[in-house]
Amino acid sequence: MIFKPRQLSREGLDGEALAADKKRCKRFGPCGVGEKALYLNSFYMDRCFYVTLSSVRRVFKRVAMSKGGFTGRGMFASIPYLVVEYDGGKQKQCNFRREDDVDLLLEHMARVHPDIPRLSEEGERRMSEKARREAARYLRELTPQAQRAWDDLEKARARLAEDPARSSRLARAARVRRNSDRSNPAYKWVALTILLLGAAALVYGIWTWLNRRDNSGLYFLLFGFAAIFFFSGANVLPTARNNKRAVAREWEEARADMEEFVERSGKFPVPGRYAHPIVLERMIRILREGRAQTSGEALEVLKKDLQALTASVQVEQEEYDEVVCIKPMFLLENYR
């Protein structure tokens, strides 16, 4: 272990146990989950801190900005964080580049440490209120046909839960493809131009500072650093993986992979192009509300619900997050 993670919790691990646990930890973006500790990042370095799992009291996601989602508006995505509460109230907030990595980490925690809460106290309160409101909408008893459809959807959801990365890849690829189709290609080239100007300003600032012995070069130096730092992390530069052809290929591969998975699973209540746990969960709610009797009917009702949710419709944050995740898949397929 080249760099030893810094201990944050009161409890710690001895050097040998720490090195072995970090080496075997399952990585999610800049963080990791080991058998004995959570490995957390700083702004610059991955997995440079650790908190023993026995010290963790709560772990949850926080999103700093409102998502652009399927609207295609804006150049930048949301800023997701993982928040870890430990030692009776202390918090460590970890920034992630991809929200999917936070979700996958929390799903992994749900499997290996179901006793650790994965919502903030405010989130738990909102979920309880939402559950009470939903319970009032649901039928007390379903028809046998609707009950069978519900059972099939639950089995399909459990099947997807065995490999959550596949569903996450499908939703992420659809979201990126949708944003790429709706964004102006000129944005990428403008960002690249500013980045190159920043690099030139950085070089000129260093040369001026070293040779003229005055502070005028500092302004070019600071501008160059700012431009390079900002646009390097904005995910708008044209690269081998960030262009329309590569984005389209990733969507086709993710969809083909899911369709193959669905075919191997035998009878599945939704097509592979829509196979996502959130889709199945919303279909179950439709059945429980009595708006459909079969999986096919529930899927059609879901399509109508998503079509009705335009940018002008206000919804709760939880539903907004669900719609932003799955609606791009339906839009790319034109709701077929």
Image: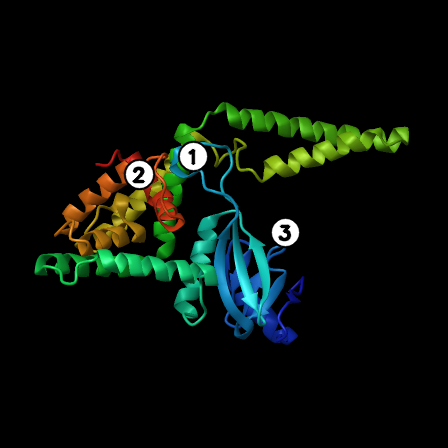
Most extreme residue toward the left is 144
Above or below for 330 versus 102: above
Circle 3 or circle 1, nearest the eye: 3
Provide the secondary structure element on which disc 3 rests. loop
Residue at x 38% of width, y 37% of height: 70
Q: Residue 182 vs residue 3: left or right?
A: left
Residue position for label 1: 246
Label 1 Cα crowd, 10 Å radius (few <14 / some 14-19 / many 20+):
some
Residue at numbered disc 2: 309
- Label 2 is placed on what type of residue? Leu
In the picture, the disc for residue 43 is: 3
First reached walking from the N terminus: tag 3 or tag 1: 3
Report how far apart the C-alphas of labels 3 and 1 lie in the structure.
29 Å
Residue at image coords 40%, 65%:
110
In front: mark 3 or mark 2? 2
- Left or right side of 245 for 40: right
* Three-letter amino acid code at the position of disc 1: Ala
**Residue 35 x/y as whole percent:** 50, 71
